[in-house]
Amino acid sequence: MKKKEIKKMTESEMLKNLESFKKDLFNLRFQKNNGQLKNPAKFKETRKNIARLNTIMKGKNA
């Protein structure tokens, strides 16, 4: 998810996406432990998306 895309979102959409990414990260952890993870790069991408959303949300609240 690009920074430009996030800035166009409303706050409720950001929160919805944030929750979705957190659930994805949770599921990725289980897949890793069970040996079912097919794309390990998804971890890094998901963590970065969560960080981007948090950063932009903090900037809008300030």
Image (cartoon, grey):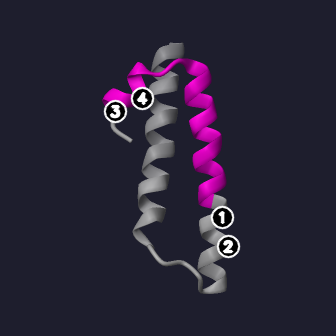
Seen at 45% across and 45% down, the residue is 49
Circle 4 packing at 10 Å, graded few (<14), some (14-19), many (20+), is some
Circle 3 packing at 10 Å, graded few (<14), some (14-19), many (20+), is few
**Circle 1: element type:** helix
Q: Do the residues labelled 1 and 2 touch (CB within 8 Å)?
A: yes
As drawn, 28 above or below 36 = above
The disc placed on residue 3 is: 3
Name the quadrant containing residue 25.
bottom right
Q: Which amino acid does label 2 sit on?
A: Phe
Which one is nearer the viewer's eye here, 38 or 45?
38
Circle 2 packing at 10 Å, graded few (<14), some (14-19), many (20+), is few
Closer to the N terminus: mark 4 or mark 2?
4
Seen at 60% across and 56% down, the residue is 24
As drawn, 31 above or below 45 = below
Q: How far apart are marks 4 and 1 (CA)?
A: 23 Å
Q: Distance between the residues labelled 3 and 2?
A: 28 Å
Name the quadrant containing residue 7.
top left
- Quickly name the residue at label 1: 27
What residue span does the magenta drawing correspond to? 3-25
- Quickly name the residue at label 4: 6
- Quickly name the residue at label 2: 30
Q: Distance between the residues labelled 1 and 2?
A: 5 Å
Q: Are marks 3 and 4 in contact (CB under 8 Å)?
A: yes
Closer to the N terminus: mark 1 or mark 3?
3
Quadrant showing the N terminus: top left
As drawn, 32 above or below 41 = below
Seen at 49% across and 34% down, the residue is 53
